Amino acid sequence: MVKYFFLIFSVITTEAAFAQLTVNIQWQSIKPGYSGDTIYYETDRKLSWADFKGRPDAASPAAAITQSGFGYRMSMQSYNNRTTINITVFCYFNKNKSWVKRGMKTNYALEHEQHHYDITYINTCKFIQMLKEAKLTKSNFASVVEKIHDDCFEALNKTQDEYDGQTSNGRIESMQFAWNKKINEQLAALATD
């Protein structure tokens, strides 16, 4: 079971008339030593149970909850008839809203939770790819980026639901192993892009 949320973007404009448009898409830079309540996805950093700081919900049938999501910030700058749109994308894990129940801290369960986070990252990469392929213009960029985000967010929710549904939240080992293989293959393909 996973909860998601995203940040709303803001657009800053300085001129109404533009002649040239440049779009920059980049990952959120991670400050060295950052230790807040958010972990930004890094391909070489796996989750540990120490990252799950939230208070468990005793009424929940889940052994653990991973709260992850993705979002973007967007700004626009204009100078001398040149317009630049900067889109910064991030994929995150919220430590304080992710939890594990006492006695449930197994490697098997942690791998299930890690894959929830990996699914979020995979869908974030799809979001970036769709942004790169989009035909953004000065008049449509805000609505097009929002539509792509919404579509990718919907696909993320669907995949997360399928993952938990087909594995019964990790309780059906054969399905969990099939999903592990599928997710690991998708991550490997992204590493070669």
Image (tube, rainbow, N blue to C red):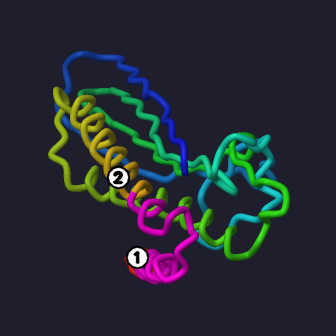
* Identity of the residue drawn at 84% across and 56% down: 102
Q: What element carries label 1?
A: helix
* Identity of the residue drawn at 58% across and 70% down: 171
Mark 2 Cα-neighbour bin, 10 Å: few <14, some 14–19, many ≥20: few
Mark 1 Cα-neighbour bin, 10 Å: few <14, some 14–19, many ≥20: some
Q: Answer yes or no: do the residues labelled 2 and 1 have beta carbons within 8 Å? A: no
- 48 vs 131, left or right, is right
**Amino acid on which disc 2 is placed:** Lys
- Residue 45 appears anywhere in the view: no
**Taken as a whole, is the magenta stretch helix, strand or loop?**
helix
- Residue under circle 1? 186
Asked whether residue 91 is drawn in magenta, I would say no
Query: Earlier along the polypeptide chain: callout 2 or callout 1?
Result: 2
Residue 82 lies, in percent from the top left, at: 27, 33
Residue 90 lies, in percent from the top left, at: 52, 48
Q: To which quarter of the image does residue 10 belong?
A: top left
Residue 44 lies, in percent from the top left, at: 64, 73
Give, as a single range, the part of the protein colored magenta: 162-185
Residue 138 lies, in percent from the top left, at: 19, 30
Q: Quadrant of the C terminus?
A: bottom left
Q: Tell me the mark number nearer the camera, choosing from 2 and 1.
A: 2
Residue 15 numbered mark, or none: none
**Amino acid on which disc 1 is placed:** Gln
- Residue under circle 2? 158
